[in-house]
Image (cartoon, helix red, strand yellow):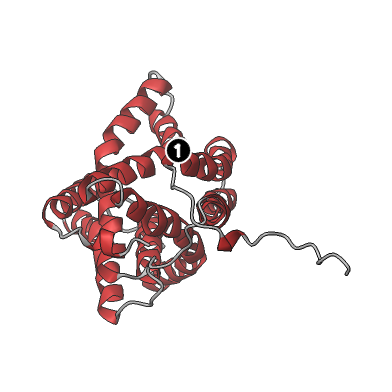
Amino acid sequence: MPPPPFTLPDASARPPGPFSLRTYLWIVFALSWPPQIAYALWANDPTSGYLLSSLSMVMVTVGTFIAGRWVFRDGFKNMGWRWGKPRHYGAVFALALFIFGAPVLIENLLGLHSLPETFSVGALLGSFLTSFLLTLFPSFGEEFGWRAYLLPRLAQRHSPRKALLIHAFIWWAWHIPALVKIGWQVQGGQGSPWLSVAVTLLVSLLPAMMNAVLFAYVWAASGSLAVASVYHSAYDEVRDALDRGIGFGPLVSIWEMAATLLFGAALLWKADWSRLLQRSW
């Protein structure tokens, strides 16, 4: 009898391997940090900035897929593969408008900042819709990795709130190249740039972590990666469209940091996070 044909083993048929946070982060950071570092060093125009930052976000998905499919082989079930409800979408758009639109409105009403002569509502909406649609897929990339895949696995090993804080710190740390760029630009030739970078990193830590908790709540409460991705894109592009079309005065950054810090802290303390365990594989 001829020998049976040679076939490769089916990786999906093997039992899942134990999840390793260190291995996961090595994979994801190795793939997603190079374009983010390139963004920090060389993105001096909107097009290159968008392409490099978006590539970094998408590579979070690529790294997560590699980890879930071939390294840990634990799959992608129960990650929020549903559309969510209309009220979820309305809520996330309202939240993005509150965080960025409310302080812009207050600044203009109080005379702290004035509308540019070329301001147009139609141009502002067009700018937002274009950038919002372009950012949806990169936003999915981050939510797929940090919230839908990583967070439930951390919740299997820690209490839900500890898992949230670990995931939030990782999310902040992942943004370090971009934060270094921001700190360097804020310095503006006055004093030590590295001191400005250090202050930026320190000041951003808690607000960014609580913002990650807020993002996590959107995903967990809606049970939908689609809703979480829409919120991520709306958060980024409401901010950017308003900055391009109107400009930000001194209140916006203070309001944004305070709002995300307070909302995130309140949710971390009061929300029912047991659903994280229900969403794990």
Closest to the observer, 19 or 36: 19
Residue 108 in view (yes/no)? yes
Label 1 sits on a secondary structure element that is helix
Residue 244 in view (yes/no)? no
Closest to the observer, 161 or 213: 161
Residue 249 pos. (x, y %)? 28, 47
x 41%, y 22%: residue: 194
x 16%, y 48%: residue: 265
Total marks in image = 1
Residue 176 pos. (x, y %)? 42, 36
x 11%, y 55%: residue: 270
Closest to the observer, 37 or 68: 68
Q: Quadrant of the C terminus?
A: bottom left
Label 1 environment density (alpha carbons within 10 Å; few <14, some 14–19, many ≥20):
few
Tell me the residue that label 1 is attached to. Answer: 22
Q: Quadrant of the N terminus?
A: bottom right
Which quadrant of the figure has residue 34? top right
Q: Is residue 243 left or right of residue 70?
A: left
Residue lying farthest top? 192
Residue lying farthest front? 1
Residue 210 pos. (x, y %)? 24, 47
Residue lying farthest left? 270
x 37%, y 44%: residue: 171
Closest to the observer, 189 or 209: 209
Q: Which amino acid does the dot numbered 1 rest on?
A: Arg
Residue lying farthest bottom? 86
Q: Is residue 138 left or right of residue 263?
A: right
